[in-house]
Amino acid sequence: MPEPEKKPKFDLGKYITETQLYKSMFRHGYSTSDRDRALSVMTNVFFHLHPVKVRKSGARFGFTWCAGGLSFFVFLTLVVSGIMLMFYYRPTVEYAYNDILALREHVPFGIMRELHRWGAHAMIITVWLHMFRVFMTGSYKPPREFNWIVGVLLLVLTMLLSFTGYLLPWDQLAMWAITVGSNMARATPFLGHEGPGAALLSLGDIHLVTSGSDVRFALLGGRFVGAGALLRFYILHCVAIPTVVVVLMSVHFWRIRKDGGISGPL
Amino acid sequence: MIEAFKIFINSVSSPATIFTLAVIVFILFVSFPKQATSAIVMIPLLIFAAAFLAIGLTDKHFYHIITTPDNVPIVGLIFIFGYFTWYAMRKAVINDERMAQGKPTIEKEETDEKVLVFPYLIFIEFVIALAYSIMLVVWSIFLKAPLEEPANPTVSPNPSKAPWYFLGLQEMLVYFDPWIAGVLLPTFIIIGLCAIPYIDRDPATSGYYSFKGRKFAIIAYLFGFWILWILLIIMGTFLRGPNWNFFGPFEVWDVHKVVPLVNVNLSEIIFIKWFSVGLPKAWFVREAPGILLVLAYLIIPPAILAKTAFKEIYKKLGAARYAILVMLMLMMLSLPIKMYLRWAFNLKYLVAIPEFFFNI
């Protein structure tokens, strides 16, 4: 006996994708063959930072915690919100504080500064978390040892980015945090005027390392946190350090691929 | 009842007790990782932490410190890193047990299997990015970025604090001069981190969570991260008030709190207290005991350890790598050693040569 023909089930997805409206918007269907999936990585400049295939153990969220990828994403959001802020902020003693105040007072529901500040805190946490994961899985071991060094440098630069940005609102919190932080530079051996060995660097009675020529002076552009420091920190924060970070990130991502991808057991 | 609890916590809080307690908890955690990461220990611990936070938030002062906008990330950080430390250790314990039974690790079972990045990995990244974005927007809506009075070089706030991620270094200033706490030790932290893969090189234990095979590395790293970095940040942020004095978690930051400064140098202990002869005039005579002590610290333990406890490590690493490893370890341990010397003997400096700004 021939089986009774089953009535096809109603498929909402199919119904929608076959309407004229849908077909007019999306010319092609979404194909799920391996070839198409591979192509979608290779033909996309952003996706192709990845290889086409990865170890299953390495793709697991439970293995990587996605901390490195998230750090990169947080960096991108910080670039976007940072550029927005640059439109309204002038790095001079006259304007800096008032511009920040205006952002708060004149923008209804404005959260751009919050997105940037809390994003900066979040990036420090995600970068620490990424390092923590890489350590706990032993993923720094050969052949990835150089990429670990690049990562350490990126970690330091992340904290310096946050530190230089901390001064820009030009309020009491900012100024004194940077004063406390940069006072350490005064004590750098040989290079700071209160550091051990600085007194040895002198010609007769003339000291070569003074409060007007030491490493702290170079950092702040002055003897205290003033107009010079504000401009220097602004340029370091918006141009100099991000440039170095982008270069090092390129090396970091490229080396992941060259060193054999996300680590896995031998 | 709650008041009594608060008073009790305040009265037992001091850098020495908190640090010692943390070290004990740390030693228990790495000694019994299996028991420590089990639900029986972890759930009560989590409840205790949440309850402490909840009770604390009813306290006006505690609430003020915790909800200061720039301090909020630290509270989040404690829970995030607490969770992931537990998670990594749990996975390590499970993998160690599997290997002991002759089974492959969780990662090993899947390592030869390959998945397509699109959609499997892209999907994870997308969900994480989305979740983070939502969290950030919510965080930004409910917590305003701080903005205080305009910068004024003539009015310094008390306490003046660096950004929170550098407060571990600022806390070290209690025990070391700026050239050590602010320059030397941070440099050693960076160099030490960079040196890790050149000292711990065996690729057989890479790519999966494990503890048994790399106990030394993991204990050293977790100690540095949790005790010498995160704990100091917590102390520096939440428990250091005006004049960098120590305050209990529920103690109001009183500007007029008087803490006697009774710290003495090693040279004073030796020449005045023990020999009763007064300090010698020449600095190299005065500081000779301290200098010898520091040199002995840097030379004798490495030599003895190379022959005894670290014999295998010495053999494996060779002289140069071993010297670097031990030097980094000694630098790391110099901080807790100096802390305990301060707490036990009020020791200010082992070597004090103010003539050259050289104090250790």
Image: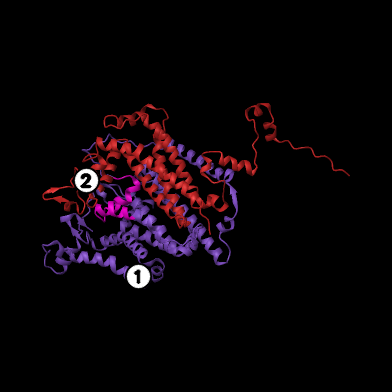
Colour of chain A in the rendered structure image:
red
Chain designation of label 2: A
Nearest-to-viewer mark from 1 and 2: 2
Magenta residues: mostly which secondary structure? helix
Q: Is residue B328 part of the magenta span, yes or no?
A: no
Residue A255 percent across, percent down from the top left: 46, 49
Stretch in magenta: B161-188
Q: Secondary structure at mark 1?
A: helix
Q: Residues within 10 Å of mark 2 (few under 14, many from 20)?
A: many
Q: Residue at x 56, y 41 (%)?
A: A42
Q: Which residue is mark 1?
A: B305
Q: Amino acid at mark 1?
A: Leu
Q: Residues within 10 Å of mark 1 (few under 14, many from 20)?
A: some
Give how far apart the Cα atoms at labels 1 and 2 are: 41 Å
Residue A45 percent across, percent down from the top left: 52, 38
Furthest-right residue in this view? A1
Q: Which residue is mark 2?
A: A214
Colour of chain B in the rendered structure image:
purple
Q: Amino acid at mark 2?
A: Asp
A229 relative position to B21: left or right: left
Q: Residue at x 41, y 67 (%)?
A: B316
